[in-house]
Image (tube, grey):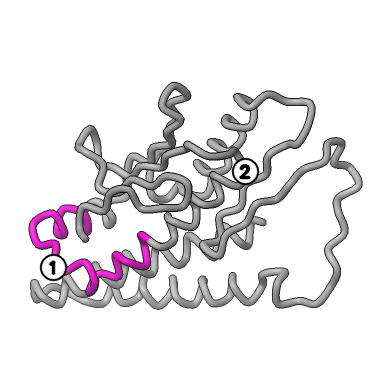
Amino acid sequence: MMILGFAIMGGLITIIAGFSLLTVIQNGGSKVGVSLLLAVALLGTVFAIWKLPYWSHQSTAPATHTAKKQSQISSPSGQAFSASSSGVTQADNEKSVQQQLAKALTKLGDVTFDAASKTYTLTVTNSDLKQTIAALTKKPSLAKQAKWPRFVENFTKTSGSLEKSLGKGYRLEVRVGQQSPVLVFKDGYVIKNQFE
């Protein structure tokens, strides 16, 4: 599953680096550092995808040390959540999913969970992503050029994974600081996309 996480993160970093490169080109700055980051992110993503178990035709046997039966919920975005099917409360499952989500998105920001509203929130701390959101806030027409739709699609799939793992009614929000969320998802659907 760690390779799966690397594949997601590589894809997100590639998108962010691509947008940063476009910004640098428009502003006439030095392209060397951003180009290098983009190349490394692309290579890392391709390598991680190639190493996924999907590509090897070996049968995957369940781990013998796992005491509880677990259901694995995966999405093409690469985010997978495991929720125990017995012996634990829904609150335990919610906390477990929060930890998995926080680990997968650690390079983008901090993940919190509000049990009352059943809402997972990614508060962006990644400087490149914050710049991208700031630029799109000023000029939403750059969204397609910045590959924002692909970014949204990945989070839509992650939201779908939340529903499969925890049940209906769970929201996933992406925000910068205390500002209004730029993205809101629920049960695998986009509720709000500020740049659409």
| 136 displayed left or right of 61 | left
Asked where in the image residue 59 lies, by quadrant, the reply is bottom right
Q: Which sits in the foreground, 122 or 75? A: 75
| Front of the two marks 1 and 2 | 2
Please state, as top left, top right, bottom left or bottom right, where the C terminus lies in the image: bottom left
Residue 148 place in picture, x, y as percent? 29, 65
**Label 1 crowding class (10 Å Cα cut-off): few <14, some 14-19, many 20+?**
few
Please state, as top left, top right, bottom left or bottom right, where the N terminus lies in the image: bottom right
> Can you identify the residue that label 2 sits on?
165
In the figure, 50 relative to 68: above or below?
below
Magenta region includes residue 95: no
Residue 115 place in picture, x, y as percent? 47, 24
Q: Residue furthest right?
A: 64
In the figure, 193 relative to 26: above or below?
above
Residue 87 place in picture, x, y as percent? 79, 26
> Can you identify the residue that label 1 sits on?
141
The mark that comes first in sequence, 1 or 2, is: 1
The secondary structure that dominates the magenta segment is: helix
Which residue appears at 51% of the width and 71% of the height? 45
Dot 2: what SS? helix
What segment is highlighted magenta in the picture?
Answer: 132-152
| 140 displayed left or right of 36 | left
